[in-house]
Image (cartoon, rainbow, N blue to C red):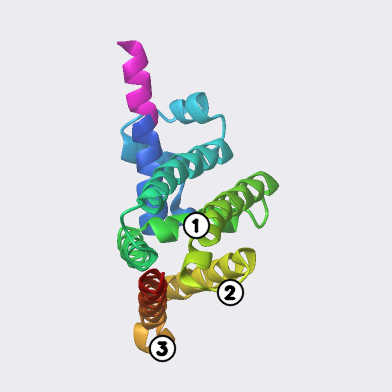
Amino acid sequence: MSGSVNIETRERIMQAAISILGRDGYQRLSTRAIARGADANLALMNYYFGSKQGLLLAIYDSLEREKFARQDAMYAAVDEPLSAKWRRAVDFYRQDLADGFVRLQHELNVQGYHDPVIAERARERILTWSALLREVAEHSFPQLGIDLPPELAVSALFSFWYGMEAQHLLGMTEQEGHFFEILNRIGDWLEAQERHSSQFQDAAGSGA
């Protein structure tokens, strides 16, 4: 019984910290605010996480597992074209932006500017996601006739996406940045590549 209580208390502390980070930012993430939000004793934070840094890393790891599993499952679906997966990824982004996850992720990343341990965890995250997307690109690009080095395409995508997130968090509107228009046009372009590839394969099959 005590083990389950311990897990529940630890989770409540993490959820309280996630809520504060996503809503109010790192500057409001005090141990007292977390303890109050979790309805837990202040001393339990050190007991479960050792330090505020330990809590941030635990949050980072927990959210990373959840979001990565979501994307990994999506890209693993073999009966869905890349364009549809792209549009689902955009929908996920809208959801993550609305529920505060994007802000939370950037709040954590910013701490890496002066905390090398958190910076290393952020770099690991980027490399893990890059490897997933590079695998998708390596599989999909030849089928779609896309002549782009996967590693360069993924790097360009990451740079755009992080810049888009930062600008959204600063309040840039769609009219000012055209972010979702760009994402939609990429989806349209992928659909056109898929149609072209399908027509080419049909023509090759009938010629045989």
Tag 3: residue type? Glu
Structural distance between the alpha carbons of marks 1 and 2 = 14 Å
Report whether 64 appears left or right of 2: right
Residue at image position (63%, 53%) is 112
Residue at image position (33%, 67%) is 87
Label 1 or label 2, whichever comes before in sequence order:
1
Residue 9 forms part of the magenta stretch:
yes
Q: How many residues crowd around disc 3 within 10 Å: few (fewer than 14), some, or many (20 or more)?
A: few
On residue 136, the disc is: 1
Q: How many residues crowd around disc 1 within 10 Å: few (fewer than 14), some, or many (20 or more)?
A: some
Over which residues does the magenta segment extend?
Answer: 1-10
On residue 147, the disc is: 2
Number of the front mark, 3 or 1:
1
Residue 44 forms part of the magenta stretch:
no
Tag 1: residue type? Val
Task: From the top left corner, tell me how far across and down residue 174 is, in percent.
Answer: 36, 83
Q: Quadrant of residue 147?
A: bottom right
Circles 1 and 2, Cβ within 8 Å, touching? The answer is: no
Secondary structure, mark 1, is helix
Using the image, determine if residue 160 lies above or below residue 40.
below
Secondary structure, mark 3, is helix
